[in-house]
Image: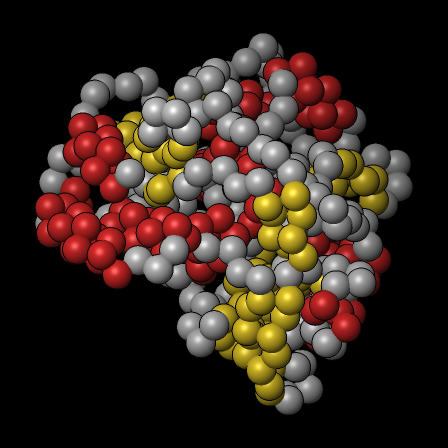
């Protein structure tokens, strides 16, 4: 597996200097570590660590699918530079042991979550090495600190992803979102606020719509004086969906990002059957989980001075990748894969936001008390900027998240 992954990276990675790292040394170290591997999960972690040397959000190991699915019963998110519990599943071991939204996560299995390592920690514990239990060091909103060991729920199922198929990228990222976010993916939803078509809030959890669905959703926005597009937690999706969405907000033919790789490729730009863009006043909500296409759209809106960005700094996971399917074995075949970045994406201002993210125009970070009370100060702030009063507590209940 390790050697197959290495060949794919060497042949396809966008930067032939590999960001200045010694790729040979990174993989030689991983191969030596294989002798000490204690389990399949440990082996997968070693392969993933070899790729982590590239420090690239879109280059990572795709382990063989598991029949058993782990659900920990709680969600966490980086808010600013701190990690918080943002949801707890009713009836879970976490709920029975007093874990609540607003608890700050100081450490997971002894390791402190940071902006730099958070995504890798989730990939490790959800996809590469799921655990029957996880040990968390927590700080309650009132300041009390402690360590709790939380049992996970094991569910049996079957999930096969055809990494060579037409929709491989979308299917794989959907699988990752499901594994790394135990709540069911939020549905696309709209809520009206104010009166006389003052404000429409559109919750867009992913760029996963058909062309007809994009037209239907954004066609509704034309009737409103102001629009909030909520991209919090939106980890991206199809480029064609991004381009069509951007056409409704910016007009056609606006360059969003240039692709830079081994081969010359056309830029990502707004496109679609949109004669005139929407003219409503616009606010975009983002957070630390807004990634990829969500970040590109938010930054393009900022560059074009089309609207105001409200919330937290985004993920900084903005590159183009291709997924490769691999297999080993004869009588019993094991399938695995690797995602390899084949282009960096450079915005219209000449800068890449990989590793940097998009800084909001108005920074709004919910406090531990806000999370505990279910308040949404960012949504309330965005509505206020657009001239509509919205109570943070009411805002927090507009788009409830359900557990699977």
Tell me which colouring the rendered structure shows: secondary structure
Which is more toward the observer, 158 or 166? Answer: 158
Image location of residue 104, percent across then percent down: 59, 75
Which is more toward the observer, 295 or 263? Answer: 263
**The quadrant where residue 124 appears:** bottom left
Q: Is residue 57 left or right of residue 199?
A: left
Image location of residue 32, percent across then percent down: 17, 55
Q: Which residue appears farthest toward the front when viewing the image? A: 331
Residue 320 visible? The answer is no
Which is more toward the observer, 378 or 401? Answer: 401
Q: Is residue 273 left or right of residue 332?
A: right
Q: Report the residue at 55% width, 23% height from top.
A: 241
Residue 147 visible? The answer is yes
Q: Which residue appears farthest toward the bottom when viewing the image? A: 144
Q: Report the residue at 60% width, 87% height from top.
A: 145
Count of number-bearing discs: 0
Q: Is residue 115 above or below residue 247?
A: below
Q: Report the residue at 57% width, 40% height from top.
A: 67
**The quadrant where residue 231 appears:** top right
**The quadrant where residue 57 appears:** top left
Q: Is residue 165 left or right of residue 228?
A: left
Which is more toward the observer, 98 or 267? Answer: 98
Q: Report the residue at 58% width, 33% height from top.
A: 159
In the picture, the quarter occupied by the N terminus is top left
Image location of residue 102, percent across then percent down: 67, 72
Image location of residue 230, percent across then percent down: 65, 44
Q: Is residue 162 above or below residue 10?
A: above
Q: Is residue 160 above or below residue 274?
A: below
């Amino acid at each position: 597996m390790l050697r197959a992954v290495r060949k794919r990276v060497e042949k396809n990675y966008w930067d032939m200097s590999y960001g200045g790292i010694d790729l040979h040394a990174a993989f030689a170290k991983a191969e030596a570590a294989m002798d000490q591997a204690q389990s399949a999960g440990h082996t997968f972690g070693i392969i993933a660590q070899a790729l982590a040397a590239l420090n690239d959000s879109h280059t990572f190991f795709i382990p063989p699918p598991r029949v058993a699915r782990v659900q920990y019963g709680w969600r966490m998110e980086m808010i600013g530079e701190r990690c918080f519990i943002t949801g707890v599943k009713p009836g879970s071991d976490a709920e029975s042991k007093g874990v609540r939204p607003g608890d700050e996560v100081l450490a997971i299995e002894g390791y402190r979550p940071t902006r730099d390592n958070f995504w890798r920690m989730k990939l490790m514990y959800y996809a590469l090495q799921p655990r029957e239990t996880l040990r968390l060091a927590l700080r309650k909103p009132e300041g009390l600190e402690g360590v709790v060991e939380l049992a996970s729920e094991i569910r049996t199922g079957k999930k096969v992803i055809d990494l060579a198929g037409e929709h491989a990228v979308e299917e794989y990222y959907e699988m990752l979102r499901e594994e790394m976010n135990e709540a069911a993916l939020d549905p696309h939803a709209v809520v009206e606020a104010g009166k006389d078509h003052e404000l429409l809030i559109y919750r867009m959890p992913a760029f996963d719509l058909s062309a007809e669905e994009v037209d239907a959703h954004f066609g509704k926005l034309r009737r409103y004086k102001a629009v909030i597009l909520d991209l919090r937690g939106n980890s991206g999706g199809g480029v064609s969906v991004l381009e069509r969405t951007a056409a409704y907000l910016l007009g056609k033919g606006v360059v969003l990002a240039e692709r830079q790789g081994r081969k010359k490729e056309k830029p990502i730009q707004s496109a679609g059957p949109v004669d005139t863009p929407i003219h409503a006043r616009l606010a975009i909500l983002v957070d630390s989980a807004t990634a990829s296409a969500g970040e590109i759209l938010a930054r393009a809106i900022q560059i074009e001075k089309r609207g105001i960005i409200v919330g937290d700094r985004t993920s900084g996971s903005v590159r183009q990748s291709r997924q490769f399917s691999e297999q080993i074995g004869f009588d019993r075949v094991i399938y695995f894969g690797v995602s390899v970045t084949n282009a960096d994406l450079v915005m219209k201002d000449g800068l890449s936001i990989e590793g940097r993210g998009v800084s909001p125009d108005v920074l709004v970070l919910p406090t531990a008390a806000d999370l505990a009370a279910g308040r949404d100060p960012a949504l309330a702030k965005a509505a206020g900027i657009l001239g509509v009063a919205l109570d943070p507590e009411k805002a927090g209940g507009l788009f409830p998240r359900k557990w699977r």
